[in-house]
Image (spheres, rainbow, N blue to C red):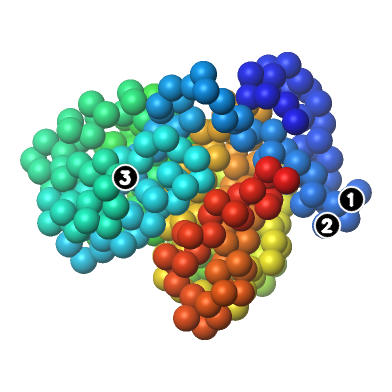
Amino acid sequence: KLSHGEADGAVPGAKCTVLERCYSLGTTSHKGMEEDIVSLVKTIVPPLNSKKHKGQDGRIGIIGGCQEYTGAPYFAAIAALKVGADLSHVFCTKDAATVIKSYSPELIVHPVLDSPNAVEEIEKWLPRLHGLVVGPGLGREDLLLRTTQVIEKSKARDIPIIIDADGLWLVTQRPTVIQGYHKGILTPNFMEFTRLYEALHHEPLESSDHQRSILQLSVAMGNLTLVLKGKQDLITDGSKVISCSTEGSGRRCGGQGDLLSGSIGVLAHWAYAAINPSLVAAFGACSLTRQCNRQAFQQHGRSTTTSDMIQEIGSSFRKLFES
C-alpha cells in the first residue's frame, strides 16, 4: 500500500492507468473492475500515525439543518467523523442547533444559517475546511437559498463540494451555481435525478437507459461527477460510467443518503490530496454505505435504521479498505 505522501505525486501515471482500465467497461469484467477501483480507494486512505495533528485528515463542513430537519445533517456529519475526518462542522439554523448538538458532543455546531449575516459567518470558517456537503436538512425557504453564495465562495477556495437532498433542489433552480465546477459531486436519487435532467434538457426523461442519461446530464452540467443512487449506484464524470453493486440489503431507511454524502465529503478530500479523481471517492463511499447497510441488516433485519448503519462504519471500512 502506498503512503499518503507517495500517493501525492510518486506514481500518478500508474494510478491513472489503473483508473483508465477501470473505465474500459468492455475490456474487463464487472467484478474485476470493482476490485480495481476498491484497490484505488485503498491508496487514498491516509495512514494513521503519531506524527499527525488534529484536523490533518479532514475538516468537513455540512450546510443544512432547520427546525423540521435535524437528523439529516447529524447523519452526514457523524458519518464523516466515523469514516475518518478529524472534525465535522454543521452550519444550521438557530432552532436546529441545540437539537443537533444534543445528538453528539463531537460535532461543532454553528447556529448561523438564518442569521442576517449568514454568508459572512460561514465564510470565515471556509479557510479551515477541506470539503463541504450542502443540502442535508437544508429546507427550501427563501432565506436558506443564500446558500448559493456560500457555494460560490467555496468554489473560489477549490475544495470538493458535495450536493445532496435540498441542495439538489437548489441546483435544479439554479444549475449554474455548480455547473462546470471540477470538484463538484451531485448525489441524486432517481426522482432528484429526473428533476435535474428535465431542468437541464427542457424535456421529459423518457429513456430507461440510465447509463446514457446520467452521462448526458453530467456533460450538460460541465462534466460534474454524478452519483445516481439505486439498485446499483451509477457514477460518472461525463466520460465513462462505473457502477457500484456492493451488496447492501432490501431495507431502505431514511438517512442512508446523508451517510453517503458525509462519507463522500471525507473521501473526496483524501482523493484530491492523493490521486485527484472524485469518481474514486464516490465509488468508495457508495461501497461503504452499502456494506454498512448489509451488516446492519444482518443484525437488525426489518428494524434496521441509519443509526444502526452508523455503528457499522468502522468495521465496514476495515473490511473494505484496510484488509
Q: Is residue 277 left or right of residue 75?
A: right
User: Is residue 265 something one can see in this rendering?
Assistant: yes
Give the residue at x 27% y 37%: 149
Q: Is residue 308 left or right of residue 292?
A: left
User: Taking 114 as reference, is 298 above or below it?
Assistant: below
How many marks are shown on the rendered structure?
3
Label 2 is placed on what type of residue? Lys
Q: Is residue 162 visible?
A: no
- Amino acid at dot 1: Thr
Q: Nearer the viewer, residue 234 or 223?
A: 234
**Looking at the picture, how far across and down is residue 7, in whole percent?**
68, 23
Q: Tell me the mark number nearer the camera, choosing from 1 and 2.
A: 2
- Image disc number at residue 31: 2
Labels 3 and 1: the sequence-earlier one: 1
Q: Helix, strand, or loop for circle 2?
A: helix
Q: Which label number is shown at residue 106?
A: 3
